[in-house]
Amino acid sequence: MDIERISDIVLPAIPETLIMVAVSSLIGVILGLVLGIILYVTKEGGLKENRTVYRILDIIINVIRSLPFIVLMLILVPLTKLIVGRRIGLQASIVPLTVTAIPFLARLFEGNFNEIDEGIIEAAKAMGSNTWTIVKKVVLKEALPSIINSITMTVINLIGLSAIVGTIGGGGLGDVALRYGYQRNQLDILWASCIAIIIIVQIVQIIGKNLAKRLNKK
């Protein structure tokens, strides 16, 4: 086992994985939160019930979530090229990761909001709060610990999916594991990449769990 060779190959791939996961997670959280709020507000019996809006978003989210990531990634190749100007590489990998993160988070956030005690919502209505005030000061506040858990789950999921984008030269640890570990049968590189991914996942899990626990106590 050549430690220096492993360091030269694996270590540069770690920040690539972190960048693609961080960017796709950030965009996914923002847009997923917006969609999650719309789903919650427009659902049957919601604050602003709108069955048409809910049904359209529900269908779109279900369709995207039903597609295997490798298939979604291939379908999005033209869109990826349109957005970033290329089909492979670090920037290109962010597009499919983001697209898969948005509906995943939207559905999780919707579930988080639905778990909130309806009594609290009714009390806010009785006090004359409008829809936006209820969403901002009641729904988001009450669901915050669950939101953190959902984000943590999504980030961990994206770390795993980031390895798949290596199949199209997306960079990161997945690309290294594929090119060196599998195609060139360099098992030390393969195991080093796996260990790096496991460590990253564990760190994310610990941070997310502790943050959710702290917010839940508050």
Image (spheres, grey):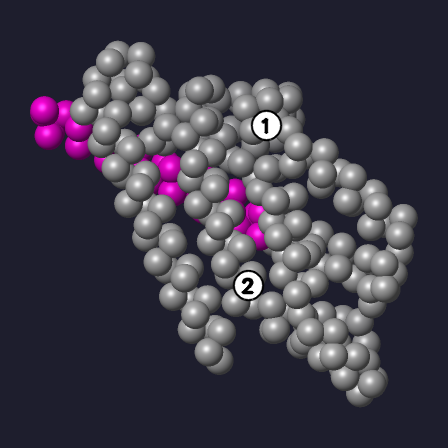
Q: Taking 196 as reference, is 17 left or right?
A: right
- The secondary structure type at the circle numbered 2 is helix
The residue lying at 18 percent from left, 24 percent from top is 188
Question: Where does label 2 land, which residue?
Answer: 146
- The extreme bottom residue here reads 127
Above or below 98: residue 143: below
Q: Is residue 8 magenta?
A: yes
Q: Is residue 133 magenta?
A: no
Expressed as whole percent of the image width and height from the top left, the position of residue 147 reads 56, 61
Residue type for callout 1: Pro
- The secondary structure type at the circle numbered 1 is loop
- The extreme top residue here reads 184
Start-end of magenta stretch: 1-29
Q: Residue 186 lies in what quarter of the image? A: top left
Viewer-proximal residue among 82 and 38? 38
Question: Where does label 1 land, which residue?
Answer: 68
Viewer-proximal residue among 168 and 89? 168
- Quarter of the picture holding the N terminus: top left
Gap in angstroms between the C-alphas marked 1 and 2: 26 Å
Most common SS among magenta residues = helix
The residue lying at 71 percent from left, 70 percent from top is 135
Viewer-proximal residue among 13 and 164? 164
Disc on the earlier residue, 1 or 2: 1
The residue lying at 65 percent from left, 43 percent from top is 103
Q: Residues within 10 Å of mark 2 (few under 14, many from 20)?
A: many
Expressed as whole percent of the image width and height from the top left, the position of residue 172 reads 36, 31
The answer to whether residue 101 is visible is yes
